Amino acid sequence: MSLLFSDPLPSRCAPHFLGEDVDEATFAEVRQILLRRRGFDLGMYKDGCIRRRIAARVRAKGFPEPRPYLELLVRSDAEVDALIAALSIQVSQFFRNPSTFELLHRQVLPELFRRLRLRGCRELRAWSLGCAGGEEPYSLALLLDQLVPPRMKYSIRAADISPAVLARAREGLYEPARLGSLPQGWRERYFSAEGGRWRLHEQIRRQVSFEEHNVLADQGPGQADLILCRNVLIYFSRAEQERVLRTLAACLPPGGVLVLGRAETLIGESRELFSILNPAERVFLRLGPEEAGTGPGQGAT
């Protein structure tokens, strides 16, 4: 049997790669491969975390050093997708940071619906960026199912860079641990048991559309009234964080809402584009043109 086009097999006697991260030369080669094959630029990310995840992927494939892994990466579409998924993976669950979703439920979403009605709009548009397994956008859909006023509707677009991650998110099938923060009675109301896991009902799943999108792209994800971009910026350099924040600001109308992760905040010139709605929950309001630069958002820490 020819092994010409198969994955290189590690020697049975060779130890697995033991490095905690990869060296500069390996990182540079991986960067060029992903940039050439997927337009995915690792140079925009904080490379400490990224190097560790590349090394973990080398170990997972059983190679004694990175060179054969690079050879695999050059010719295997499946491995390119697997590596991108590993680099962008987020551990999540439904209603992660429950107090953030409580604020959305109690204040943010009702106020957004009120403003939309005053403007004669009948649809609330939301984005969930870096959506991983879908827990965040589906959590938002569950809240909106409870709150949407009569004769109004909502749409949620969820994005991630990994096609494999998005495919799993569309299935809406979760381990019990992922549902640990659901409000009482919601698991039975919105999920069905299936082979030891729980599948979200189709009526909620169809409210969320999943699509591939790189948040570092120059083009924004599109217009929205609410953007959740939580625990995404932490992977980027400061310059790239500021660029992403400016891009997201351009997608929001005055009064639109941006939600960041607990370890993230506004930086640089982006602080002039938002005011602070809730500093603890990292919730910000887009300022109008006449307000931008007046400074309320500059106190974000």
Image (tube, grey):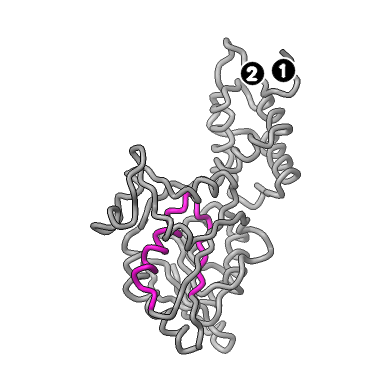
Name, please, the residue furthest toward the left.
184
Please name whichever residue, 102 or 145, is drawn nearer the observer in this view of the structure: 145
Mark 1 or mark 2: whose residue is earlier in sequence: 1
Q: Residues within 10 Å of mark 2 (few under 14, many from 20)?
A: few
Residue found 47% across the figure and 74% down from its top: 257
Q: Is residue 268 left or right of residue 228?
A: right
Residue found 42% across the figure and 54% down from its top: 135
| Label 1 with label 2: CB-CB less than 8 Å | yes
Q: Is residue 71 left or right of residue 145?
A: right
Would you say residue 287 sits in the magenta stretch?
A: no
> Bounds of the magenta span?
124-149
Q: Position of residue 207 (x, y in %)?
A: 47, 63
Residue found 48% across the figure and 48% down from its top: 171
Q: Quadrant of the C terminus?
A: bottom left
Q: Position of residue 131 (x, y in %)?
A: 50, 55
Q: Which mark is residue 116?
A: none
- In the picture of the structure, the residue carrying the numbered disc 1 is 3
Alpha carbon distance from label 1 to label 2: 9 Å
Q: Which mark is residue 9?
A: 2
Q: How many marks?
A: 2
Residue flagged by tag 2: what amino acid is it?
A: Leu
Q: Secondary structure at mark 2?
A: loop
Please name whichever residue, 219 or 176, is drawn nearer the observer in this view of the structure: 176
Q: Quadrant of the N terminus?
A: top right
Name, please, the residue furthest toward the top.
13
Q: Residues within 10 Å of mark 1 (few under 14, many from 20)?
A: few
Residue found 30% across the figure and 50% down from its top: 180
Q: Is residue 106 above or below residue 167?
A: below
Q: Would you identify the image quadrant in which residue 72 lies? A: top right
Q: Would you identify the image quadrant in which residue 70 lies? A: top right
